[in-house]
Structures are given as structure tokens and as C-alpha cells.
Image: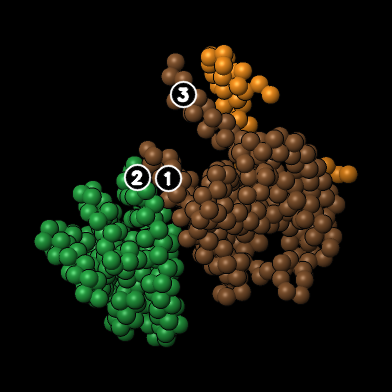
Amino acid sequence: MSAFAALVGRDLALAFRQGGDWANVAAFFALAVILFPFGVGPEPELLARISAGVLWVAALLAALLSLERLFQSDWEDGSLEALVLMPLPLELQVLAKCLAHWLATGLPLTVIAPVLALVLHFDAAGMGALVLGMLLGTPVLSLIGSVGAALTLGARRGGVLLSLLVLPLYIPVLIFGTAAASAASMGFSAQPHLLLLAALLAAALALAPWAAAAALRQAME
Amino acid sequence: MPRFANPTQFMKLSAVLVPWCAAAAALGIGAGLYMALFVAPPDYQQGEAVRIMYVHVPAAWLASLVYGLMALGSAVGLIWRHPLAHIAAEAAAPLGAGFTLICLVSGSLWGEPMWGTWWVWDARLTSVLVLFFLYLGFIALANAFDDQSRGTRAAAILAVVGVINLPIIKFSVDWWNTLHQPASVFRLGGPTIAPVLLWPLFMMATGFLFFFATLLMIRMRSALLEARLRALKFGNPR
Amino acid sequence: MNWQNFFAMGGYARFVWPAYAVAALVLLGLLAWSLGSYRRVQRELGIREEKSPRKRKAARAP
């Protein structure tokens, strides 16, 4: 357990020491969202209608930004091989890295989202469902992303390839996340969509570390 | 290990099978086309547009079937390190992508006159689009590394992970309210389509299946010959 | 057999025929590509094995 916590702590320290990652991701998220009123016009009704989708798509793309580096630095300096030899199972190590990634990217996105939602005239009635949906969905993005990051370690044009692999798998999260937020903002129950997001999270927690660990092992063969 | 699993045995076996499968493909598709265009009656609601079904549905069946085979081959290759398994999966990928493309395009052409729209984001269409991207991702990943075996293994993992999409495709029309019609052939309780419409469907599907088998074997033979070529190049620098 | 009616496909010609055409194009394209690659590697192997030392050819002979 302490080894798990230590790994999470180490990755988090790296993420915040470089100052870069989480701030970049948050800034990208905010900028991407802010572009939309300039692009589609400032009409409140139009913005309100697309706000849930815009927030989720921007969050998706922002999460994607930092995924490439999830395993990269460890792989490049050789510490990935040392991690495999640790007594902590590789699957748990992947989980630790995903947790650190989420704490450094998904969580800040979830916190900033309500502020940006107001900018897009998102109906405040849906705020709870938006935040809860993101709390459930952004970890799934980190988990699925870890599989893609492990598969594309060291690939040519790895960043683009990572997006090609991971974005189709993100689509269910996007669909249910926006459905939850939109439904709540229109006065309907967001519960079925949130439950499905929770199910996706449970499935991702169970499957993604296993798949990512398998991908990491074959990357080091 | 089965005898035909050996690459040399496979070359011998496929040399015999390819002409027969090719002939069966030509017959199946030829007969299927004839029945689809001249024998099958127009639909009382959809008119002649229903003939698109004889291209769209077999392509859809093959799109999923080929992915299943690709995932199976990938799993076998990863677990048992069978020499032919990865070769089979990588040979099948472009073929499966082709069938998926035919399914998507023909479906779109069928949807416009029938539903009034070229595309709709319902569960069935979206999951088939995801299938198409899984094929493309598999092909891209397999070719993305300087070390070919690394790409092969990474793509194999992707294929196995993506298999979760297959039940979603199959049951999407049951689990969600979709614009796409529910299952009418492969369902408990048997098909709900009239036999006169089923025959051209099965004939085309059989033709497509033999077409796939033929090209799969040809592509696997190519891959094995290319491996031999590389071995020769390394053993004989001049 | 009224060919004009047949090609008109009850008014749906601009949907039915492109669907069949795309299927034909994709399948024939895959066929051409697969056969082309196969013939190319066969040719390269044929030439290669002529250039190889004698004993390689002797070893290959049944």
C-alpha cells in the first residue's frame, strides 16, 4: 500500500515540479472553451445548447495532451524497466500513474469546468450533473489513455497515433457525460447517464491497468 | 501444434485452397448479385431501394466476423506465440476495414432515401464507425515502429482490447432506441425476413466470406514470402 | 426485361447503384492490391534466388 502511495506521490511531485503539465492542461481547456463564443457567435441560447458538448470535448482534448508523457520519461531514462522489477505488480503501478495523472489533469479540469460553463451560459440547474459526470468520466479518460500511451511508447508520430487510438474509445464517455449535463440542465434526470458513467469507470478500473501493463511488458521485450 | 500451422505446411495447403475459394467466391457473389438484382422482389415499403440491403448486410456481417477473427488471431499470437497467428491478423485487417467501409457507405446511401438522413449518431452506426477506427488504428499501430515485432504485438493488444466493441455493435439495437432497425436474421426465435429475401442475402454473404478467405490466404502467403525475402537479404548481403 | 426500368431502380437509382459501385470498387481494389503485392514479392524472390550461391538452390530443390 505504501509503495502504491509512494508511486502516486512521486508522479504527482514530478507533474507539479515541472510546473508545466497541469497548468498547461488547464490553460488549454480554458482557451479551447473560450474560442467557441468567438467562433459560433455570442448568442446565449446557442451557446447554452452546445455548452455541455463543448465542455466535454475540450476536456477530452486537454486530457489527451498530457497522455503521451505518461510513460515517456520513465521509458526514456530506463526507469520503466526498474519499475517492472518492483514487488508492486505492474498493474497497480499503472493504476498509481493513472491516479497521479488524473489528480494533475482530470481533477483540475473538473474544478474549472463550472466556471467555464457560466461563460457558455450553461443552465446552472445542470451544474451538479456536469461536475459529477466529469468526476466519474475524467478518470476513465486517464485509464483508457494509459492503454493508448503504453501501446504507442516509442512509436513514430506517437502523438497523432495516440489520438487516433484513444479518441474512438473516448466516445462513450463523451456521449454519456454530455447527456447527463444536458438532461439535468433541461430539468430531466441525469441519473441513468451518470450510472452508465459509473459503470464505465468500474469497467475501466478493472480492465485498463491489465491492458496497459500488458502493453508495457511487450514494449520492453 | 496442428500440422497446417507450420508455415511450410500452410504454403502447401493454401496453394491448393486458394483457387477453390476464389471459384466459390466468384460463384457466390455472382449468384448473389443475380438473385439480389433480378430475382428478389422489391419491398412493399422501400421499393427497389431494399436491394442495397444485399450489399450492406453481408458487408456488416463480414466486418464484425473479420474483426473477431483478427482479435482471436491476436490473442493466440500473444498467448501461444504461434508463428502464423499475427500474420493472419495483420493480413485480415485491411480486408475487414474494407468491409466496414462498404457497410458504412452503403448504409448511408440506404439511410438517405429511407430515413431522410445520410447519418445519425445512434448506437449502431456509432459503434460501427468505432469499429472502422479500430481497424485503422490496428493497421497504423502495426506499422508505427521501426522494430516490426513491437508494432505487431502492440496492434495485437489493441485488437484484443477492442473486442469489447463487438457485443456493443450486435446488441446496440436492442439496448438503445436506435433509428437502425433491430435484428431480423440472427436472433432467438429465428429470422423475421421472408425466405425469398434471405436467399440472396446468404448467397452474397457466402460469396463475401470466400472472397475474404481467398484474399486472406493470398496476403498471408505474401507475408511469408516477404519474411523469406528478408531472411535471404540478411543471409546474402550481395 | 425492361432495362430502363431496371436501371431506374424505381427512382432510387442514385442510391442503389453507387452502393453497389462502392462495394465493387473496394473489393476489386483489395483484390488488385493483394494480388499485386503477392506477384511483386514472388518476382523479387525469383530474381533473388537466381543471384544466390549454387548451394542455396540445391538445398531448396525437393
Query: What is the three-letter code of the residue carrying label 1?
Result: Gly
Report the chain holding disc 3: B
Report the chain holding disc 1: B
Residue at the extreme right: C1
Residue carrying label 1: B151
Q: Judging from the image, what secondary structure is the residue with disc 3 in?
A: helix
Q: Colour of chain C?
A: orange
Above or below, A221 against B173 in this view is above
Q: Quadrant of residue B217?
A: top right
Viewer-side residue, A30 vs C55: C55
Q: Position of residue B14 (x, y in %)?
A: 69, 38
Above or below, C32 against A175 in this view is above
Residue carrying label 3: B235
Mark 1 vs mark 3, CA separation in Å: 24 Å
Residue at x 73% of width, y 52% of height: B205
Foreground label between 1 and 3: 3
Mark 3 vs mark 2, CA separation in Å: 28 Å
Residue carrying label 2: A155
Above or below, C20 against A113 in this view is above
Kindly indicate which chain is depicted in green in the rendered structure.
Answer: A
Q: Judging from the image, what secondary structure is the residue with disc 2 in?
A: loop
Quadrant of the frame with the N terminus of chain A: bottom left
Establish whether labels 1 and 2 are both on one chain.
no
Query: What is the three-letter code of the residue carrying label 3?
Result: Gly
Q: Are marks 1 and 2 in contact (CB under 8 Å)?
A: yes
Kindly indicate which chain is depicted in brown in the rendered structure.
Answer: B
Residue at x 53% of width, y 53% of height: B80
Establish whether labels 3 and 2 are both on one chain.
no
Query: What is the three-letter code of the residue carrying label 2?
Result: Ala
Q: Quadrant of residue B176?
A: bottom right
